[in-house]
Image: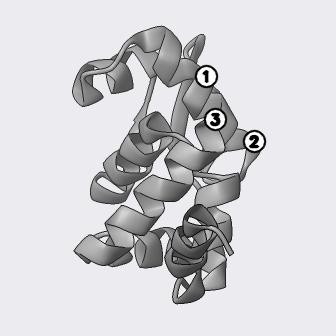
Amino acid sequence: MSTSDDLASRLVDDMDPRLLEFIRARVNSFIKWDLVRFFYDNPHTTDTAANIARYTGREAADIEQALLALADSGILQIAHVSGYQVYTLTTDRATRELLQQFVLACEDRDFRVKAIYHVIRGMS
């Protein structure tokens, strides 16, 4: 077994499989991670991509792509209000619980290191 295989094994072994899949399939970029955190901290937010970009300090075009992807994955919902497309956190209880587990797990440095590894690995 190579050193990189050993490292990869250690970075997966003790992760909750649901959280690992959540990272790999739904929060697979740092922009999405920031947005998940933003909506977790502001669960009643309903706003446009441009405003969310301003709040998060990101480019609107990047944010819009990530918001659409998060909506496709069921984390966010899209609505049309007064001619604007707005995004809000899903009302699905299971998804919100998974989101909470992810955010709380991120308080642990070891988990964050593992999550960062998987985001970077997924980007390549």
Residue with the most extreme front position: 2
Q: Are marks 3 and 2 in contact (CB under 8 Å)?
A: no
Q: x%, y% of residue 63?
A: 48, 23
The C terminus sits in image quarter: top right
The colour scheme applied to this rendered structure is: one colour
Q: x%, y% of residue 122?
A: 64, 45
Query: In 3D space, how far apart are the residues under numbered discs 1 and 2 (Cα atoms)?
Result: 11 Å
Mark 3 lies on residue: 124
Q: Nearer the viewer, residue 100 or 115?
A: 115
Q: Secondary structure at mark 3?
A: loop
Query: In 3D space, how far apart are the residues under numbered discs 3 and 1 (Cα atoms)?
Result: 18 Å
Q: Is residue 26 left or right of residue 119?
A: right
Amino acid bearing label 1: Gln
Query: In 3D space, how far apart are the residues under numbered discs 3 and 2 (Cα atoms)?
Result: 21 Å
> Is residue 91 shown to the viewer in this render?
no
Q: Nearer the viewer, residue 104 or 114?
A: 114
Q: x%, y% of residue 50?
A: 40, 14
Mark 1 lies on residue: 65
Q: Residue at x 49, y 41 (%)?
A: 32
- Mark 1 Cα shell of 10 Å, populated few (<14), some (14-19), many (≥20): some
Q: Nearer the viewer, mark 3 or mark 1?
A: 3
Q: Is residue 94 left or right of residue 46?
A: right
Q: On the image, which quarter does residue 113 sit in?
A: bottom left
Query: Which tag, 3 or 1, sits closer to the chain's start?
Result: 1
Question: Which of the labelled discs sits on residue 72, or is there none?
Answer: 2
The N terminus sits in image quarter: bottom right
Amino acid bearing label 3: Ser
